[in-house]
């Protein structure tokens, strides 16, 4: 029998052995922190705006969009990253972005209101893609029955695929993303969140689904990484990496200028994601995504380790609200609360229990690191 690993937490950040592949040195510092010190920090200049580079990028995007209604596209969730990205795109880069909002059926009112405030305040055009609810619910219930940790795949993939498919269809070559190095040095391990694996999703739905996915948007890794990039010239850009991105100050600016409202936690603009990250993952798998979020803040110098540990002493969100969310989600997915609890209590599984593209994802990470495209400790 395999001996259970002794619990250990990094002495520098708050990542721990719930990331089963984490490695500690003789000082108790984890490999995420060591990777940051050796491969990211020497080249990361958080207090320097790269306006010259940003202007060159902006000119390139504007030139590609000349004669078109829009020169770029970006997805807006109402969260801090995407909202600040919209501000940078319009007010700093002077672009004409088309805002894409994907309605998966779970957004809270605060998210809807934030989206409206940003779009109206910046005078931007918006297109809303509404996902077929019956198909979405069937796929989400299939994922719960599959008993894996990555329950947000049906939503995340629908948003991702809708954005890229729309851009290709309307010949918009530049996709702006709010992903950034300032808040994402440490990514959630694939063990916690195995995302963008369409092969796995389709196998799960084949086993547990009841309804054909006729309109659910899809975009495979092959299509996204090779076909769209090489044959359609699509380029993904990261504007927040060119500016000083202090998240607290960005949130303050958004609030003062547009009345934007901060969420309790990252990704809590959505009732499903709130339940998935705040209840399902910690209770079923022992995974708490706040650990990598808070560890990023520690490494960025915007929070102390002691402050992060104090936050982790508290539950991700109110237990009473979690029970209400559980009942609400069960009803919306078409099962009773008792049936939903029974499904959640089934033995845990991993992506390896289904057909998957793990080898392709890992190969992509390997070559991205080899050629210097990716320097984070992704595994």
Image: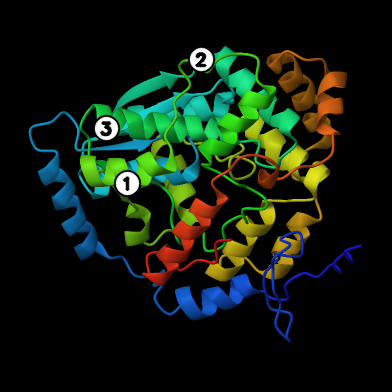
Residue 199 badge: none
Task: Look at the numbered disc 3 and give the secondary structure of its residue.
Answer: helix
**Distance between mark 1 and mark 3 Cα atoms:** 13 Å
Residue 132 badge: 2
320 shown above or below 244: above
Please identify, in this view, whether the residue under mark 1 or under mark 3 is nearer the observer: 1
Q: Which residue is drawn at the image coordinates 36% and 29% (left, top)?
A: 100
Farthest residue in the bottom direction? 26
Colour style of the rendered protein structure: rainbow
Q: Earlier in the sequence, mark 2 or mark 3?
A: 2
> How many residues crowd mark 1 within 10 Å: few (<14), some (14–19), many (20+)?
some
> How many residues crowd mark 2 within 10 Å: few (<14), some (14–19), many (20+)?
some
Please identify, in this view, whether the residue under mark 1 or under mark 2 is nearer the observer: 1
Give how far across and how far down residue 355 sits, in percent.
61, 40
Farthest residue in the left direction? 67
Front residue of 205/185: it is 205
**Distance between mark 1 and mark 2 Cα atoms:** 28 Å
- The quarter of the image holding the N terminus is bottom right
Q: Which residue is drawn at the image coordinates 47% and 65% (left, top)?
A: 366
Front residue of 183/247: it is 183
Q: Which residue is drawn at the image coordinates 43% and 56% (left, top)?
A: 180
Task: Look at the numbered disc 1 and give the secondary structure of its residue.
Answer: helix
Q: Quadrant of residue 327?
A: top right
Q: Are marks 2 and 3 in contact (CB under 8 Å)?
A: no
Name the residue carrying label 3.
Answer: 168
Name the residue carrying label 1.
Answer: 226
Q: Quadrant of residue 166?
A: top left
Give how far across and how far down residue 215 sits, in percent.
45, 17
């Amino acid at each position: 029998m395999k001996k259970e690993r002794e619990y250990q937490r990094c002495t520098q950040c708050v990542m721990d052995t719930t990331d089963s592949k984490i490695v500690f040195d003789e000082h108790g510092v984890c490999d995420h922190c060591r990777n940051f010190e050796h491969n990211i920090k020497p080249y990361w200049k958080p207090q320097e705006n790269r306006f010259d580079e940003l202007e060159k990028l902006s000119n390139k995007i504007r030139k590609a969009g000349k004669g078109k209604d829009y020169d770029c596209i970006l997805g807006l969730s109402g969260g801090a990253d995407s909202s600040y990205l919209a501000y940078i795109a319009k007010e700093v880069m002077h672009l004409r972005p088309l805002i894409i909002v994907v309605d998966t059926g779970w957004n809270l009112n605060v998210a809807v209101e934030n989206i409206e405030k940003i779009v109206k305040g910046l005078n931007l055009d918006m297109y809303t893609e509404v996902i077929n609810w019956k198909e979405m619910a069937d796929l989400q219930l299939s994922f719960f029955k599959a008993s894996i940790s990555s329950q947000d795949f049906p939503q995340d993939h629908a948003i991702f695929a809708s954005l890229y498919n729309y851009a290709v269809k309307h010949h918009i070559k530049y996709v702006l993303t709010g992903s950034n190095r300032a808040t994402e040095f440490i990514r959630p391990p694939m063990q916690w969140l195995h995302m963008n694996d369409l092969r796995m999703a389709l196998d799960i739905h084949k086993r547990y689904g009841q309804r054909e996915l006729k309109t659910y948007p899809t975009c495979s890794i092959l299509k996204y990484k090779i076909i769209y990039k090489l044959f359609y010239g699509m380029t993904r850009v990261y504007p927040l990496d060119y500016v000083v991105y202090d998240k607290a100050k960005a949130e303050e600016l958004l609030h003062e200028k547009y009345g934007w409202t901060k969420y309790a936690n990252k990704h809590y603009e959505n009732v499903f994601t709130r339940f998935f990250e705040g209840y399902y993952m910690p209770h079923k798998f022992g995974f708490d995504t706040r650990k990598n979020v808070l560890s990023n803040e520690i490494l960025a110098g915007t929070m102390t380790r002691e402050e992060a540990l104090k936050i982790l002493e508290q539950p991700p969100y109110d237990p009473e609200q979690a029970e209400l969310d559980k009942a609400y989600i069960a009803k919306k997915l078409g099962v009773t609360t008792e049936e939903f609890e029974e499904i959640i209590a089934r033995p845990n599984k991993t992506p390896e229990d289904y057909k998957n593209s793990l080898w392709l994802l890992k190969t992509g990470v390997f070559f991205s690191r080899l050629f210097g495209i990716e320097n984070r400790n992704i595994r």
